[in-house]
């Protein structure tokens, strides 16, 4: 299953394109199935309808836990590094993790959860988060993990969309020097969530919380009432495994659905290959389990391959900007997988935090979430990898389930800021605006995928039409990624950014419409338009142009009010970096906002704005330019 040379990569890639069913059928043999499939793949991209490993039965937790017990039961599965470095780190072996997952799976059953129920998880980055995720999968319940930075309204929207029956949370979370009151936020969210019957609360920060009689129970109390024997529920390969909400170009987040069989095979295969994982190595992905990276490359991918995965509660700069390097040294980390935002942030502190740190254990470096710029790539390569650790610059999405285009560590020749080549089974294609294929090298276009892969989304929860419209209707018979892409002379791929109304802020996708909706909820705001602009640390920053006529000269106060509104409606993650008050927005005569013009102004371009004669009021552009210059 593991690719060890470039020649083998070329052979495997060729085979995966010429005979995908045979290729994936052989890869899938490396996993444990209760019943084999009668058909590897059936698909069409019109409906869309995709089925992998039809008829097969399995439980993903048997692949992540049970099958390792006999040979690797005492091997560390998860090493937890707390927010405060003064606290002890915790190591859970595969045996311990298996026991705790089974015990908590029984807690879920005791609280009424059964196969097919949706369960919302809103927790800090603690071992119990991974345990909760796996316990849901153990009993066949569908988990919907929500990142700890979202607001009560965002949580309520997600709970109601998927009609969750249970919520799993904690009293609070540590994030650097801050404490996040998770249970308080959940209490606010649940006021409008009639489907939730039970809320299981983990004690973590030891802060007083309100516990509602009949609904809320303590994790610690519940585990005392159950044993640690829980037979894994038999699942069909195409049964739902989880829902993960992601921003789209309309205001409402969409629940991306991944299923058991194909997702397991793809997450495990890509983890093993991209990072060239070797038995016994320590692997550290710095993402949050609330995002797809955490699902695929902290929990399911590594554990399915019997790896040791580091789980970190804190942030890279707390209590000092040497925190990552301390963790690498302490746990002898071999692979470090992080985001360009984190790299750029750490670069800004210079080399002082690196002094005296032993990073010699690092063998592979990885980058995820957004295209990595050349400067950050070279710094990562020279200062962290000392020129000896290949950087795998991975491109993929929530919807793809796993890495799609990436170097394979120690196999593919890398090139700064290029995702390089597609993995076996991934068939990328560049198209122009009309969907015509752009062939050859040294070209750029919109990135699509022309053939299914096992980890791809199956639908958007409760709204299959939205899945079809978003991903499969822009270009006929193609999955449209929403990203622009360049293919250079060597056939290497470089992602150039979103081509739709979605921003990539610190590796997190945020829809412009979602932010605009939140800004417009502020009582004084008449209308707003949001665009992205280049940001030194985040990659893309959020620039909001806001019409707010009754401001009465209190601009700074009004900005604070708007930021508070966005935080309340979506979460702090979506707060605009810049707000410019304007009297009007550039619109066509049909009322469409010309974001292209606003984007250029946000980027500091004020002369070459293209044709503005079609605008309803061209003078408004001059006014916005003048206001922008005053910022």
Image (spheres, helix red, strand yellow):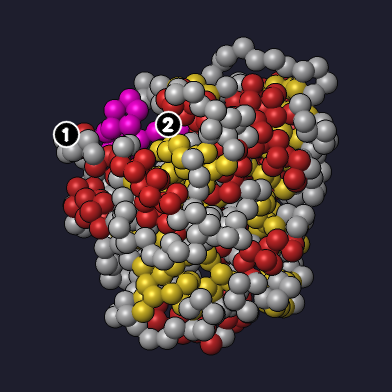
Q: Splitting the image into 4 quarters, where does residue 553 fall? A: top left
Q: Residue at x 75, y 49 (%)?
A: 140
Q: Residue at x 44, y 83 (%)?
A: 438
Q: Residue at x 79, y 38 (%)?
A: 165
Q: SS for tag 2?
A: loop
Q: Is residue 369 magenta?
A: no
Q: What crowding class fits label 2: few (fewer than 14 Cα within 10 Å), some (14-19), or many (20 or more)?
A: many
Q: Quadrant of the C terminus?
A: top left
Work out whether 104 lies above or below 595. above
Provide residue 8's location: percent of width, then percent of height. Answer: 39, 79
Separation of marks 1 and 2 at Cα, in angstroms: 21 Å
In this view, the residue in front, 518 or 318, is 518
In this view, the residue in front, 507 or 96, is 507
Q: Is residue 319 magenta?
A: yes
Provide residue 391's location: percent of width, then percent of height. Answer: 30, 59
In this view, the residue in front, 276 or 532, is 532
**Residue 293 visible in the displayed image:** no
Q: Residue at x 69, y 15 (%)?
A: 210
Q: Which mark is residue 314?
A: 2
* Residue range highlighted in magenta: 313-330
Residue for badge 1: 352
Classify residue 109 as left or right of residue 258.
Answer: right
Work out whether 456 lies above or below 222. below
Provide residue 465's location: percent of width, then percent of height. Answer: 74, 64
Provide residue 224's location: percent of width, then percent of height. Answer: 72, 23
Q: SS for tag 1?
A: helix
């Amino acid at each position: 299953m593991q690719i060890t040379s470039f020649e083998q990569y070329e052979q495997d890639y060729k085979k995966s394109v010429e005979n995908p069913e045979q290729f994936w059928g052989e890869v899938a043999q490396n996993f444990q199935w209760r019943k084999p499939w009668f058909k590897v793949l059936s698909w069409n991209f019109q409906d869309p309808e995709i089925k992998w490993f039809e008829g097969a039965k399995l439980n993903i937790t048997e692949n992540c836990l049970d099958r390792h017990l006999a040979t690797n039961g005492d091997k560390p599965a998860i090493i937890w590094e707390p927010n405060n470095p003064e606290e002890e780190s915790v190591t859970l072996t595969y045996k311990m993790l298996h026991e705790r997952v089974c015990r908590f799976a029984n807690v879920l059953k005791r609280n009424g959860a059964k196969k097919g129920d949706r369960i919302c998880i809103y927790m800090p980055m603690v071992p119990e988060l991974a345990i909760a995720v796996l316990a849901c999968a153990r009993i066949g319940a569908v988990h919907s993990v929500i990142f700890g930075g979202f607001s009560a309204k965002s949580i309520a929207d997600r709970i109601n969309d998927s009609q969750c029956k249970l919520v799993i949370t904690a009293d609070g979370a540590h994030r650097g020097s801050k404490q996040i009151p998770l249970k308080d936020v959940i209490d606010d969210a649940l006021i409008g969530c009639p489907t939730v019957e039970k809320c299981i609360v983990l004690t973590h920060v030891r802060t007083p919380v309100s516990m509602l009689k009949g609904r809320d129970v303590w994790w610690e109390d519940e585990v005392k009432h159950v044993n640690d024997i829980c037979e894994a529920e038999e699942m069909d390969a195409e049964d739902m495994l989880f829902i993960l909400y992601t921003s789209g170009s309309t205001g409402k987040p969409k629940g991306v659905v991944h299923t058991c069989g194909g997702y397991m095979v793809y997450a495990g295969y890509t983890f093993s290959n991209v990072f060239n994982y070797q038995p016994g190595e320590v692997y550290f992905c710095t993402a949050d389990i609330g995002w797809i990276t955490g699902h695929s490359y902290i929990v399911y991918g590594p554990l399915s391959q019997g790896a040791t995965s580091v789980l970190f509660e804190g942030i890279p700069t707390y209590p000092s900007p040497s925190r990552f390097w301390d963790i690498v040294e302490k746990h002898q980390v071999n692979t470090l997988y992080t985001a360009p935002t984190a790299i750029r942030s750490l670069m800004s502190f210079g080399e002082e935090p690196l002094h005296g740190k032993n990073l010699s254990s690092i063998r592979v470096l990885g980058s995820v979430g957004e295209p990595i710029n050349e400067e950050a790539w070279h710094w990562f390569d020279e200062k962290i990898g000392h020129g000896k650790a290949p950087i795998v610059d991975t491109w993929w999405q929530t919807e793809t389930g796993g890495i799609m285009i990436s170097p394979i560590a120690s196999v593919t020749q890398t090139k700064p800021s290029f995702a390089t080549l597609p993995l076996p089974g991934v068939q990328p294609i560049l198209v122009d605006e009309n969907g015509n294929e752009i062939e050859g090298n040294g070209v750029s276009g919109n990135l699509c995928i022309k053939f299914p892969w096992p980890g791809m989304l199956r639908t958007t929860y409760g709204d299959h039409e939205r899945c079809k419209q978003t991903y499969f209707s822009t270009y006929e018979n193609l999955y449209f990624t929403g990203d622009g892409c360049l293919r250079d002379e060597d056939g290497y791929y470089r992602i150039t950014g979103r081509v739709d109304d979605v921003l990539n802020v610190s590796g997190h996708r945020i829809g412009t419409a979602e932010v605009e909706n939140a800004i417009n909820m502020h009582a004084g705001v008449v209308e707003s338009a949001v665009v992205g602009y280049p940001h030194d640390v985040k990659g893309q920053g959020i620039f909001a142009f806001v019409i707010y006529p009754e401001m009465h000269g209190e601009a700074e106060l009004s900005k604070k009010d708007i930021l508070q509104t966005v935080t309340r409606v979506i979460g702090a993650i979506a707060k605009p970096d810049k707000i410019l008050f304007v009297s009007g927005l550039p619109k066509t005569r049909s009322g469409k906002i010309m974001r292209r013009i606003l984007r250029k102004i946000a980027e500091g371009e004020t002369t070459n704005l293209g044709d503005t004669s079609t605008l309803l009021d061209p003078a408004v552009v001059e006014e916005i330019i003048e206001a922008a210059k005053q910022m």
